[in-house]
Image (cartoon, rainbow, N blue to C red):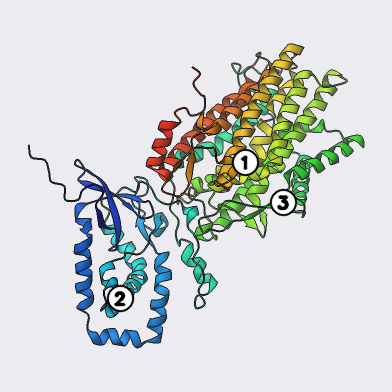
């Protein structure tokens, strides 16, 4: 059987047409798939595409056609263009515009084929084609160079108008494997004859692509909106039973009027306002976030450690003055209900304001077009009221510091309930372990600016409910459980649990610090001993140090700490082990999200990384 001939060989430099447009760019052939009859090519910025043979031209043939088209123009027309001051200005700025020109291609997915609007487009920044290097070096090419500049200017001006219509006609089997990270795109510099506003518009995409739906997609959004509040209610009611065994019948729902307490709502509102006041005080460092798609870096007031210290002092003074913090335990359900109402109202506000946000301010994963999914996932990436960043504030302040306040109140409630002079060993360990975790997070608050929540996820119900309700009312479950179900610990057991906690904390902190330092400054001399894999985005992947042992050493440390938090509660019931079970599910899901995102962003470099660092969370012991 005769094998099909391959016109272009691996390593050939050719001109490849960008899908959905009539623009050609210089590319390098990486290979040919005989089954799909597609060539894999790579552009100068590292983008890999699969193209049909008819969309590839030889460089020499392309240059010949370009020159013949230029020469076929009438001389009179060239002279009229060169004399026009307006056209001269346009030509002089065309190189600047061309340097940041982006061509949009419409991606069709099974769930959104009917929707071909520009909001489902992907923008890729490419350098303009150098069509006639030989002509530029010749001595009689002045008119040709002017004509090519004019042609490039016309292509740039018309490409945006043509691309939408052409992309619908050219939905061939193209596969976008890897593209330059959006955050690496640099904004266009404003020229003297180009206002600053136009420069920002040139740098920021006019539309935003929709990322693949996760958390079960649109149907999953309905499920989570109902399940998450119901689960919080269940664990609160279950933990208050004498026998909280999960094999028993679910606890009966209390009367509706027991869910509401005006004093509890006032307490929650005052707590949030108090934390907001501490957040806006001009105390602490102003830290820069990671670059957004527009190239802008937002500033954040990272004074979380100051906030928890002031909060601790205020709480201590209040207790000394006679405030009864055991109210938190006796009204735990009412406090959770009040916080849930606030999180829903905040989520509605966030969704409404996101409808008026610019496209470059939206998150990649929250603009599916489905109201329920977008409400759950969050549309706007960094919603702000002036300089007050709502997502950063909720992520690090009222819920996280409130977690420690609730644990302290549970310790007081245990002492009151059992007439103790001091909390039990189990309660002390739970309080100290989780306090250390929170204080460490606030001391290293700047590190959260490089996390998935801050960099990629929009701010909607998922994060608002998670930050304000889920964290303070489910992460405190061990302390809440111990109030009514004490567990005596021997001194050797205490020492073993403390040792386990310290090992997990050490792995967690060291690996996170290494990751954060590398993300912020890969050229840091202190990190010069680390081995990396370069990627087409210009970034590198760590394959040594903590990140050479497993792909997520920080998750490993987190899991060990979660185990240490649950052990003081004993093994009588499964309920206090909820956090450990939940955290395993959370980390497995987050690991799968990390894998898909990194494979999309880094392409073949990520495959090489996975071959180098084989184990995801748990290292293999030989």
Q: Identify the residue at image location x=62%, y=33%.
A: 510
Residue 387, horizontal then vertical, whole percent: 67, 58
Q: Secondary structure at mark 1?
A: helix
Asked whether, in this view, residue 425 is left or right of residue 254, the answer is right
Asked whether, in this view, residue 519 is left or right of residue 211, the answer is right
Residue 55 seen: yes
Q: Identify the residue at image location x=71%, y=21%.
A: 498
Residue that label 1 marks: 465
Q: Secondary structure at mark 2?
A: helix
Residue 18 seen: no
Q: Earlier in the sequence, mark 1 or mark 2?
A: 2
Residue that label 3 marks: 285
Dot 2: few (<14), some (14–19), or many (≥20) neighbours within 10 Å? Answer: some
Residue 592, horizontal then vertical, whole percent: 46, 34
Gap between marks 1 and 3, in whole Å? Answer: 28 Å
Q: Nearer the viewer, residue 53 or 621?
A: 621
Residue 394, horizontal then vertical, whole percent: 66, 45
Gap between marks 1 and 2, in whole Å? Answer: 60 Å
Which image quadrant for residue 167?
bottom left
Which image quadrant for residue 492?
top right
Dot 1: few (<14), some (14–19), or many (≥20) neighbours within 10 Å? Answer: many
Q: Identify the residue at image location x=72%, y=51%.
A: 285
Q: Nearer the viewer, residue 544 or 220?
A: 544
Q: Earlier in the sequence, mark 1 or mark 3?
A: 3
Residue that label 2 marks: 145
Asked whether, in this view, residue 513 is left or right of residue 11, the answer is right
Above or below, 498 against 227 in this view is above
């Amino acid at each position: 059987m005769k094998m099909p001939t391959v016109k272009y060989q691996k390593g050939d430099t050719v001109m490849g047409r960008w899908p959905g447009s009539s623009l050609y760019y210089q590319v390098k052939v990486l290979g040919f798939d005989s089954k799909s009859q597609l060539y894999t090519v790579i552009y100068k910025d590292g983008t890999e595409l699969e193209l049909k043979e008819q969309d590839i031209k030889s460089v020499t043939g392309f240059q010949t056609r370009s020159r013949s088209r230029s020469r076929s123009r009438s001389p009179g027309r060239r002279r009229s263009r060169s004399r026009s001051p307006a056209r001269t200005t346009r030509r002089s700025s065309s190189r600047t515009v061309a340097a940041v020109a982006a061509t949009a291609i419409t991606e069709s997915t099974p769930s959104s084929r009917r929707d071909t609007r520009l909001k489902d487009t992907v923008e890729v920044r490419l350098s303009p084609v150098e069509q006639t290097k030989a002509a530029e070096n010749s001595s009689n090419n002045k008119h040709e160079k002017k004509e090519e500049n004019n042609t490039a200017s016309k292509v740039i001006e018309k490409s945006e108008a043509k691309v939408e219509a052409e992309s619908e006609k050219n939905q061939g089997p193209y596969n976008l494997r890897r593209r330059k990270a959006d955050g690496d795109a640099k904004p266009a510099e404003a020229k003297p004859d180009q206002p600053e506003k136009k420069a920002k518009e040139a740098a920021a995409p006019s539309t935003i692509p929709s990322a693949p739906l996760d958390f079960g997609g649109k149907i999953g959004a309905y499920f989570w909106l109902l399940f998450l509040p119901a689960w919080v209610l269940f664990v609160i009611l279950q933990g208050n039973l004498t026998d909280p065994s999960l094999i028993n019948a679910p606890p009966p729902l209390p009367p509706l009027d027991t869910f509401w307490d005006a004093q509890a709502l006032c307490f929650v509102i005052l707590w949030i306002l108090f934390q907001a006041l501490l957040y806006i005080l001009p105390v602490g460092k102003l830290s820069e976030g990671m670059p957004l798609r527009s190239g802008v870096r937002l500033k954040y007031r990272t004074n979380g450690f100051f906030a928890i210290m002031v909060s601790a002092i205020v709480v201590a003074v209040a207790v000394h003055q006679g405030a009864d913090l055991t109210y938190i335990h006796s009204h735990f359900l009412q406090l959770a209900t009040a916080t849930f109402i606030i999180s829903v109202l905040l989520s509605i506000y966030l969704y409404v304001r996101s409808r008026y946000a610019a496209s470059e301010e939206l998150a990649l994963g929250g603009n599916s077009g489905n109201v329920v999914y977008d409400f759950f996932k969050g549309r706007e990436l960094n919603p702000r009221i002036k300089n007050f960043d709502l997502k950063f504030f909720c992520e690090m302040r009222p819920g996280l510091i409130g977690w420690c306040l609730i644990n302290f109140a549970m310790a007081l409630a245990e002492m009151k309930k059992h007439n103790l002079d001091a909390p039990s060993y189990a309660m002390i360990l739970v309080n100290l372990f989780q306090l250390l975790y929170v204080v460490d997070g606030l001391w290293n608050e700047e590190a959260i600016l490089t996390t998935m929540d801050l960099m990629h996820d929009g701010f909607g119900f998922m994060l608002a409910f998670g930050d304000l309700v889920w964290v303070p009312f489910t992460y405190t479950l061990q302390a809440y459980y111990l109030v009514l179900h004490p567990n005596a610990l021997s001194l050797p057991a205490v020492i073993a649990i403390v040792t386990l906690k310290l090992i997990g904390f050490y792995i967690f902190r060291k690996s996170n610090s290494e990751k954060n330092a590398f993300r912020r400054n890969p050229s840091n001399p202190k990190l010069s001993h680390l081995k990396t894999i370069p990627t087409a985005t210009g970034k590198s992947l760590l394959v040594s140090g903590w990140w050479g042992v497993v792909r997520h050493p920080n998750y490993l440390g987190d899991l060990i700490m979660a185990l240490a938090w649950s052990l003081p509660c004993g093994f009588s019931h499964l309920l206090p082990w909820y956090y450990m079970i939940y955290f395993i599910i959370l980390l497995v899901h987050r690991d799968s999200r990390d894998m898909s995102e990194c494979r999309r962003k880094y392409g073949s470099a990520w495959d090489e990384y996975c071959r180098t660092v084989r184990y995801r969370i748990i290292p293999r012991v030989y």
